[in-house]
Every structure is written in structure tokens, then in C-alpha cells.
Image: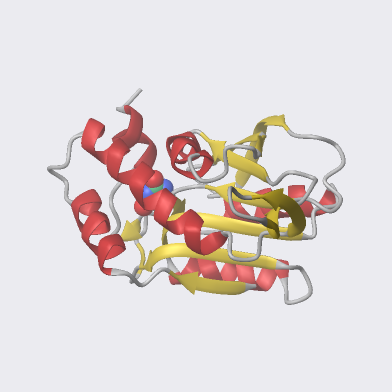
Amino acid sequence: MHLHVADHPLVSHKLTLLRDERTPSPTFRQLTEELVTLLTYEATRGLKTVPAEITTPVTTMTGQRLAEPRPMVVPILRAGLGMLEGITRLLPTAEVGFLGLVRDEETFEAVTYANRLPEDLSGRQCYLVDPMLATGGTMVAAIQYLLERGANDVTCICLLAAPEGLSTVEQMVGDEANVKVVVAAVDERLNEKGYIVPGLGDAGDRLFGVV
Ligand code: URA
């Protein structure tokens, strides 16, 4: 697993506003989208391209365009949905699948309750999006799900990660799989309820309000 922390003044500024408990849901959503767009820029450095012949108003040239098959973006429901707009803004031609994984609040284990993904992901570059990499259980289950379907290039885009969650992903996924994690920051730790400290609270609740 390769970890990339997007160390940029704009990321730090927006993340600080996002963490602030006084930030209301509409602003929280807006900031999340902006942060995800910045993270996506970093996360897509390895996107595959192919040469493309074009004619400019001046001459002909060989440019680059995104290769086929198109990248696959997979938000993890529910909180990952709040990141979709921010990523598809930069990847408008990406295909979007969905994975519904919920964390059992007692065991902290991930349980799949919905999926909308092609059976065959061979050769696809996949972008898993979930705001919080906390215990890592959900992310590991999602990564395994994609690898089992043939994906060999998986990038996880998260706002925040806990060291415990990163270790879990590292241990479970190993070095052979081509898995990257791109985050805005790595926080201190998890608390006894599985929340990231200092964190930003419950990302889903703050994005969408408490249901
Ligand atoms: N999920 C969240 O929404 N917040 C955390 O701090 C941990 C998991």
C-alpha cells in the first residue's frame, strides 16, 4: 500500500473549516466537494492515457487522452456519496458504481448491504471514496471486493485517516496489490467508539443531517 498525504495550504485551510463543529451541513458539503477535487488531482497522477492525434488552429500534434476502459469511481454508501460531485468534476467520463457497507457498531466489522458494480473489473483503475478511514474494516472489505473482481489498480480517496486504519489496510492488503491511499491528513488515533481524534465527527451525519 502506498500512502499519499496531500500537504497543501488550501487543503489544510479547508480541512480546518470542515473539522470545526460550528460548520453547518451546507458549508460542510461544499468544503467536502472542494477538498475531494483537490485530493482527486493528487490521486489521479497515475491515470492511464493514450496518444491522440489532433489539429490545433495552428498545426497538427499528438496529445494525450484518457485510456479505455474508463476509470471506475466507487463511493461507499452513505458518506461516500457526499464526495461524488467533487471527484466526477475532474473525471466526468468515469463510470460510477456503488458499494453499500455499514459498520457494525459493536464489532466494528463491515457488512455489505448493497452493490452496483460490474462483475468484471479487469484492467480498470478504480477510485474508492469514503470520507473517513477509521478502523479500516470498511475500506479493507471494499478493496477486497474490487480486487476479487479483477481490479489491479485501486486508489482510496479519504478526507481523514487514523493510523490504526492505515495499519489495518497495510496488513490486510499487503504489498503485492497495487493499492494507494490519498488523504488530506492522518490524525492522532481512534477513540473507544471508533471515531477519529481529533477528526470531524460523524461525516455522514454532518453531510446529510442525522436520520
Ligand atoms: N466515521 C465517521 O464518520 N467519523 C469517524 O470519526 C469515524 C468513522
Furthest residue in direction front, as rendered: 58
Residue lying at 44% horizontally and 49% vertically, measured from the top left: 131
Q: Quadrant of the N terminus?
A: bottom right
Q: Is residue 189 visible?
A: yes
Query: Looking at this view, is 88 or 59 the one in front?
Result: 59
Q: Is residue 134 visible?
A: no
What is the x, y in percent for residue 210?
Answer: 31, 27
Furthest residue in direction bottom, as rendered: 175
Reply above or below: 199 against 34: below
Residue lying at 18% horizontally and 35% vertically, measured from the top left: 24
Residue lying at 23% horizontally and 53% vertically, measured from the top left: 19
Left or right: 10 with respect to 194? left
Furthest residue in direction left, as rendered: 22
Query: Looking at this view, is 203 or 150 the one in front?
Result: 150
Tally of marks: 0
Left or right: 161 with respect to 129? left
What is the x, y in percent for residue 26?
Answer: 24, 31
Left or right: 196 with respect to 148? left
Residue 160 quadrant: bottom left
Reply above or below: 171 against 31: below
What is the x, y in percent for residue 181?
Answer: 56, 64
Report the coloring of the rendering. Answer: secondary structure
Residue 111 quadrant: top right
Residue 194 quadrant: bottom left
Residue lying at 85% horizontally and 37% vertically, measured from the top left: 119
What is the x, y in percent for residue 129?
Answer: 54, 47
Q: Quadrant of the C terminus?
A: top left
Query: Looking at this view, is 128 or 134 the one in front?
Result: 128
